[in-house]
Amino acid sequence: MTGSSSDPAHATRAPLSRASHAPGYLYESAEVFQREKDRIFLKDWLCVARVEEVAAPGDYVTLRIMDEPIIVARNGDGTLNAFANVCRHRGVEVAAGAGNTEEFSCPYHGWLYDLTGKLLGAPYMKEAEGFDPADCRLTPLRLAVWAGWIFVTFDRDAAAFEGFIAGYDAELAVLEQERCRLAVKVVIEYAANWKLVVENLVDPYHSNVAHRGTIGQLPKPATHTDPDVHLIGNGSLAVFFDGSPMTPNGQSLFGKMPWLDDASDSFGCSAHLAPTLQVFASCDNVHPVITWPRSPTTSTAVAYLLFPADAFDDPAFDAKLEVYRSFMFAVLDEDRWVIESQQRNLNAIGFTPGRMSVMEAPVHYVINDYLRRI
């Protein structure tokens, strides 16, 4: 791709006041999807889980990233490890879902691995000339932890995590997510390209329309009409605004997080960490979303609700939590219909990508950094 007028995305690269949205092929092409895998998902640090999901020795979670299966596990001394979920014998996955175990056993031929990915045993392999178990460790991945979030990268040569996260940490340190605990994890499947989900999450333009039944009717809807936007670089940004807690009446059921005691009751934050992490926060909780590509035209959003650890001691915690969970699910469900409608109509004869609004500045910033990379 170039910046010339022959580039189908040329109009998207223009300044916001003249820019149009990206062409439809970017959201359905198998060739583009492979390029995204090669140039973004196999290169970047990716947020994959909360530390609470693998809190005890032996805890593990599995997931697939652009069809690459991985395991994150905590071993006996409490260290977190990440490695490919691919047996070194015939490639079968050695674990599924999440749970607690002392070792991983391949269900095909019984090759056995410990919680660091080291091969412990391989039946009937002593007779194989030159076979060295030390060469058969499950392929390790680099791992880092920030603010209670676990990150991995497939790229052995990726920049140090500390440099990658520094700008984002400077903006979001105020949230102290490491002092929060995971209360709810919600999974939403979309019949749409992952970028449409990400663009929607950074788009304030739709809030009062698509979400008229939820956040659009709150006392302080998050319209971002005069937001405090901080561009972090490399497609990442943080936006601070006035908004209401995520409950049907916009009133907090828990009170402000202790470390936000000096903040307004209308504190709101929406911060994107490219490529797929979106951290939302109100005065009383943090509710991030991670978007995972599944295919050129399908994706998954994983939404989390985090509350300060002492909130869990509230005798009415479960009942209050259900109010937040139901409201969050309703918001995501409103998004799903419009996002999937976008995907269905990318090739409709009545559609060409429209001009961007000044309200879509975050979308313009995020999509243009994406175009730079692919």
Image: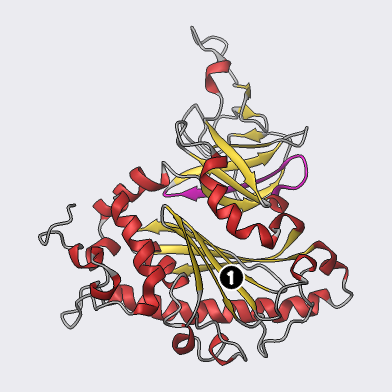
The tally of labels here is 1
Compared to residue 314, the image places residue 30 above or below, namely above
Q: Residue 319, percent across and down?
A: 79, 80
The secondary structure type at the circle numbered 1 is strand
Q: Residue 129, percent across and down?
A: 49, 7
Reading the image, the residue beneath label 1 is: 269
Which residue occupies 26% across, 68% down?
15
Which residue occupies 72% across, 54% down?
178
**Image colouring:** secondary structure
Q: Residue furthest left?
A: 6
Q: Is residue 251 visible?
A: yes
- At label 1, the amino acid type is Cys
Q: Residues within 10 Å of mark 1 (few under 14, many from 20)?
A: many
Residue 128 is a magenta residue:
no
Compared to residue 232, the image places residue 70 above or below, namely above
Q: Residue 268, percent across and down?
A: 61, 74
Which residue occupies 76% across, 69% down?
257
Residue 55 is a magenta residue:
yes
Q: Is residue 193 visible?
A: no
Q: Is residue 38 left or right of residue 131?
A: left
Write the start and end of the magenta stretch as one range. 54-66
Q: Is residue 264 left or right of residue 19?
A: right
Which residue occupies 68% across, 62% down?
175
